[in-house]
Image (tube, rainbow, N blue to C red):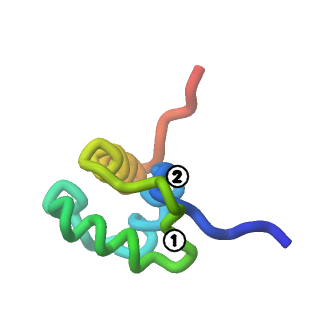
Amino acid sequence: MPDDTFHWLDVDVIGEELATAYPDRDPARVGFVELKKLVAALPGFVEKPGHVVNERILEEIQRCWIEERAGGRPEEE
């Protein structure tokens, strides 16, 4: 059975999940305290022991969410 959970370090997955769960939200207007709560409430999110969230991770999640809303990440060459 596949593991459908994701964690703080799965920033791409989190960005996709946030874009799906909150299509009308502007990620640039979501503060980090609220962002942390939104991520924690996502189905499938599980906090791993020893993987604490910090501002850098939240910034990356926010960036991925913004990119996902803009149509996804460009393919790497």
Q: Is residue 11 above or below residue 56?
A: below
Tell me the crowding category of disc 2: few under 14, some 14 to 19, or many 20 or more residues within 10 angstroms, Cα based: few
Q: Amino acid at mark 2?
A: Asp
- How many numbered discs, if any? 2
**Residue 51 image offset from top left, x and y in percent:** 46, 54
Decide: marks 2, 1 in contact (CB < 8 A)? Answer: no
Residue at 45%, 56% in the rendered image? 8
Determine the CA span between mark 2 and mark 1. Answer: 10 Å
Which of the pair 62/8 is nearer the observer? 8
Residue beneath the point at 47% across and 41% down: 73
| Residue displayed at 68% across by 69% down | 4
Q: Residues within 10 Å of mark 1 (few under 14, many from 20)?
A: some
Where's residue 22, x and y in %? Answer: 34, 74
Q: State the residue in front, 14 or 40.
A: 40
Residue 63 coordinates in the image, percent (x, y): 32, 45
- In the image, farthest residue toward the right: 1
Say what amino acid the circle numbered 1 marks. Phe
Q: Which mark is residue 10?
A: 2
Where is mark 1, residue-wise? 45
Q: x%, y% of residue 64?
A: 39, 48
Quarter placement of the C terminus: top right
Residue visible at 43% across and 50% down in the picture: 71
Q: Is residue 40 above or below residue 64?
A: below
Left or right: 62, with 49 as reference point: left
Direction from residue 27 to residue 15 in the image, left or right:
right
Q: Quadrant of the N terminus?
A: bottom right
